[in-house]
Image: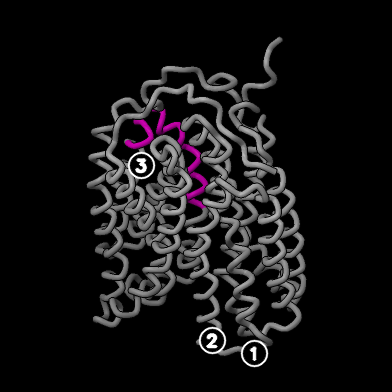
Amino acid sequence: MNPPTPPPDRFPAPARVPRWLVVAAVVLVAVNLRPGATSVGPVLAEIQQGLGLSPTMAGVLTALPGLTFAVAGAGAAALSRRTGISGAVTAGLALVAAGLLGRAVTGSVPVFLALTVLGFAGMAVGNILVPAFIKRHGGRRTAALNSVYTTGLAVGATLPLLAAGPLTARGPEGWRAALGLWGLMALVALLPWLLVTARDRREAATAPSRALPGGPGAAIARSRTAVALCVYFGIQSMHAYVQFGWVAQIYRDGGLDQARAGLLMALIAAMGIPGGLLMPLLVAGSPHLRRWIAGLGTCMVTGYLGLMLAPATVPWVWALLLGVGGFAFPTALALLTARTRDPRITARLSGFIQPVGYLLAAVGPFAVGALHEATGSWTVPLVLLMGTGLVLVAAGWVAAAPRWVDDELAGPPRP
């Protein structure tokens, strides 16, 4: 199976934004779309003590990323039609900076939660629209820019885990520095995006010069590829959050100590870096993409099977397999640009699949925990996860077919 070959470019060229500025903007936004969420876990106990946060409110705090990404992300494409893709991402980064800096200094629980939602809403806008920005400005280097983006997401998710310990050790208020640092990082990221927005005057989202395929109201769900990609992204998101929430506990219940379980979780997370580098290039150029997708799903299912049958026997093998299975995330993001031509369709497709994915990401860990509590065992949850891994492969098989979402929305050509 060969990847689809784009037809001759029928669209106006995007504004001439210098390549160095495009790369700098993508790198900086990527490393700022995860720290606001991942910086909470390592200092959650300190946040509870410092703010007097109840266990119930702490549970709400941990559920906010997935829920906010789902709700706020659903409106990102509509926002871009008013402000342009670059303008919307810039506004999102401003929300990230304001929310993360503000929550680091407040002493009020309601204000802390409200500012957290504000920051997460800004991240949701970036989650949805950065792939469309890459589609618009990547040109022949779109695959390479996708690799930079997805690798940056993995790095951004990992940095707070490394910085939390040293910052928290500085004193009883160290947790505030561990949270506020990422607000300062978002301010730094704003600078190139302000320049991009100023230069990007011909962006299609603000001044459309051509009709959207199928018309402006065409439902993205008409596209078989879009629906398959929605299922693929949703299931992989659920698996990622289930793993971050429960795999360490599964290892501990299997006989490992806390330190080893934590290291194994770090291994799973770190695999996102090579996955981010590799998969966008394979999506763009491999004639055997479906085989890769089947292989990733096989790794994931085998990792869960190992956790179920022998979690303390070669535990690093199961972690490595789950980490490789997690390559599904950069694969899904790369397919957003690889299966669309018009950047506005990329934005609509992203706005269709990502809210569903993050909703499942919020629900999945609760469902796994409830099943474990009801059965007193990890067997039923792990069997269920293996079953959804097979669904993941089936959806990816359909999404990887060499078709364009734009053409599916337009329908068959008229005679």
Q: Amino acid at mark 2?
A: Arg
Q: Is residue 53 left or right of residue 228?
A: left
Q: Which residue is mark 1?
A: 255
Q: Amino acid at mark 1?
A: Gly
Asked if 113 appears above or below 14 in the picture, the reply is: below
The foreground one among 375 and 74 is: 74
- In three-dimensional space, the C-alpha distance between marks 1 and 2, rounded to whole angstroms, equals 10 Å
Identify the image quadrant of residue 237.
bottom right
Residue 114, horizontal then vertical, whole percent:
37, 53
Q: Please name the residue shown 55% across and 69% down the image.
A: 244
Q: Amino acid at mark 3?
A: Val
Mark before the other along the chain sequence, 2 or 3: 3
Q: Which mark is residue 89?
A: 3
Residue 334, horizontal then vertical, whole percent:
53, 47
The quadrant the N terminus occupies is: top right
Contact? badges 1 and 2 (CB < 8 Å): no
Q: Which mark is residue 321?
A: none
The segment highlighted magenta reads 67-86
Q: Which mark is residue 260?
A: 2
Identify the image quadrant of residue 408.
top right
Residue 173, horizontal then vertical, whole percent:
26, 75
The foreground one among 40 and 228 is: 228
Mark before the other along the chain sequence, 1 or 2: 1
Report the predominant secondary structure element of the magenta stretch. helix
Identify the image quadrant of residue 225.
top right
Residue 391, horizontal then vertical, whole percent:
74, 54
Mark nearer the viewer, 1 or 2: 2
Q: Is residue 302 left or right of residue 178?
A: right
- Circle 2 — which element? helix
Q: Please name the residue shown 49% across and 58% down the image.
A: 276
